[in-house]
Amino acid sequence: MKEETFAPLLHTTREALDQSRLADALDGLKALAEATADWDLRTAVDSMAEAYAMMLRYFRTGAPDASRHSMFRSFLDQSYALCDRAERLGLTRTSTDLYYSTLRTVQAMGLTMAEAVSSLEEAGRQLSALPPTDSSAPDPRRAPVDRQRAEAGRRMFDVVWTSSPWTPTDTETARSLTASPLVAEADAALFVSALTMALLHQFDAVKFGLLLDLLTDGRPQVSSRAWVGLALITLRHDRRIQLCPPLASRLRLLTDDTGAIATLRNLQIQLLATLETREIEKQLQEDIIPTMLRNPQFSPSKLGLETLDEMLHGDDPNPEWRENEAVKRIEDKLKRLAEMQAAGADVYMGTFAAMKQQFPFFGVMSNWFLPFDGHHPDVVASLRELPRFMRPLFTSDLLCDSDKHSFALMLSGIPAAQRRLMEQQFEAMGIDSQSHWDDALSASTEGERQRRVYLQDLYRFFRLFAQHRQFANPFEQNLVLADTASLAPLLSDDESTLQVAEFAFRHKLYAKALHLYGKLAAPSADVFQKTGYCHQAAGQYDAAVEAYAKALLIDGDNAWTLRHMAGCAMLSGHFDRALDCWTRLGCLSPDDLQVEYRLGETLVHLRRYDEAFKHLYKVDYLTPDQPRTLRALAWCSFMAQKPAGAERFYAKLLSGRPTADDYMNAGHAAWASGDIPTAVKRYRACLKARASDRMPDDFFDADAGVLAAYGLTSDDFRLLIDAINRAE
């Protein structure tokens, strides 16, 4: 069967398994087994189908069966494994993807994990036998051993990454690699990356069990990579883990390990920090304006509410919000992470992307995950001639490992004279000490730093590797660990949830923060305020009002909450609720002219014009001839059937710096007063300000109801439009 036929069948079978439609999935497995023409697979599928049919027959008898549910879940787990087996058999023959082309190479060369372990141990044995030398001087005896070690590491990575479900022998071989004193920590860390990539491709309970064992490994590079692998694999294969009771039980045991919970909390924040905020901000901007325009009760040009942007974005977050101290400490430790990965990822990835495309080194998949130790044959020569000022860069955690390799490869192409000039320039700037590179990172623990740089390596691989589109990017899935059944018991307590929510909120990841705040069992007024703020930022004004109202139930006289609730109530058309908020604010701050103005504005929307005039006139008296106040007074007068008063205020507006809407509203006032020539003149000025030479057919639609109160009909609108558009 061709890949284009096999792949859709594979997809529908997996979809059936994901939806627990076991009978449909077994039908799909039978078709996949036929397509592979593998006798053992067909036998296994037939056996599974018969066992499930027997279970269904027994179920139909109505007899009690305490093991029914566990058997059903076991059948699902086994069916997933058969589906993985069918995929491997079917695509190995036809797929041109890197995974399957690498698998075919491994099979053709007869490469094994045992051979790779033996080669790595031999390299370690030879290196340990070499006498110590000056690291800056080349050692001709070490070069061939480094080449042997690099090649063995590459073979080990390919074998592990493409390996089928492990047998007990495979598991013992893998354990011997991680336990061998002759295998360098960097090579053991590379093994964990290969294990992670294998599990991301296809789940294997045995491999995952070994990954769990490595969480407590004493080597920071190894354990840190295992923790990151645990998080990404659980996000990807949570269902598979839950279908395997021994694995689910092992994860539940971590609930009693305070160190493990602290690590997962920190790792969760590090994962969220990889999110890019530009698209989120763009989405918010795209949502806010359409929401405003869809509201039939809101017209931004009449009362000065064109300052909507000020209401939404000008207000800082509540200055009374207390910073969560735990989050603040983590933020300080992860400041460099936020710069390099979340905000600065564009800069660093852009800088090194070209290098990674340029050097053949990055055409080898395993090289993206190599810990930087300076001994890889491709970089060792350039590091020997490294300018002194740059050496701390390669021993600090400022750059991740793949970027260090990029930088070292780049330096190898710089002439010696230019390197000396660079060194002189940097020394003149005072950049010549280890502390310059390490100050920002000194607060982090070794585990945190290792996880941070490894996440950056992974992030770059899934974005920049030449064949990255052949891989499902784990950073594009939901990164909230507490949303998985496997890790929720460790991270669903209010302390963990609030800590991560606060980080998301402070970094404007409002959708994530909102999701997390909603999980809290006992939200505080502070949490309700921030929930409202998240809804407000997304243009969800009704929801924001409700959240702010809950905050007021706890802290009824909070001016910040009242102000934001009032603004959102106005934007959602709930002017009565807005009036209540502005009134309470007026009692708290009787001399606040902004509140006074908003009171008048809200009363206009409620058609309580006489009351509105009192507030607006007060503002105009204390701060005369402000365009926003004049605009509100003019529209209030027009709505109150006082065209002469409206004309007076519009005349003042038009003598200053009028907007296109000012010309349009002034045109309405003139027309309502019977002064058609002046109205035509003002409407033309409005069109000119809008850079238009033609009045659109819907020009009067938004104000049709208001103009109708003055006896103007749709026929009048048509006449005036034609009079302007057909002027001789």
Image (cartoon, helix red, strand yellow):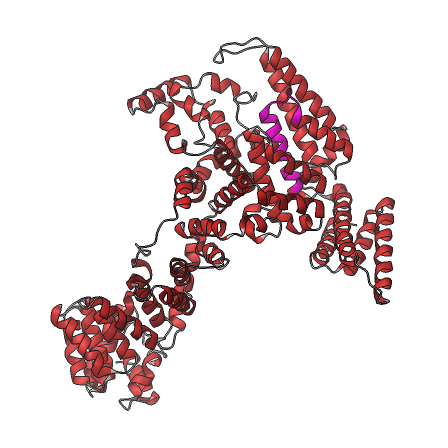
Q: Is residue 584 shown above or below 373? A: below
Residue located 54% across and 43% down the image: 261
Q: Is residue 173 visible?
A: yes
Q: Nearer the viewer, residue 128 or 215?
A: 215
Q: Is residue 212 left or right of residue 533?
A: right
Q: Residue furthest front?
A: 256
**Which portion, as a residue range, is magenta?**
179-199
Q: Is residue 294 shown above or below 146? A: below
Q: Nearer the viewer, residue 611 or 98?
A: 611
Residue located 64% across and 26% down the image: 153
Q: Nearer the viewer, residue 345 or 581?
A: 581
Q: Is residue 638 left or right of residue 105?
A: left
Q: Position of residue 334 (x, y in %)?
A: 42, 39
Q: Is residue 340 left or right of residue 683?
A: right
Q: Position of residue 173 (x, y in %)?
A: 73, 28
Query: In the picture, which quadrant includes the C terminus?
Result: bottom left
- Residue 109 is drawn in which quadrant? top right
Q: Is residue 453 shown above or below 685? A: above
Q: Main secondary structure of the magenta part?
A: helix
Q: How many numbered marks have been drawn onto this rendered protein structure?
A: 0
Q: Position of residue 429 (x, y in %)?
A: 29, 25
204 magenta-colored: no
Q: Is residue 467 visible?
A: no
185 magenta-colored: yes
Q: Position of residue 129 (x, y in %)?
A: 62, 10
- Residue 672 is drawn in which quadrant? bottom left
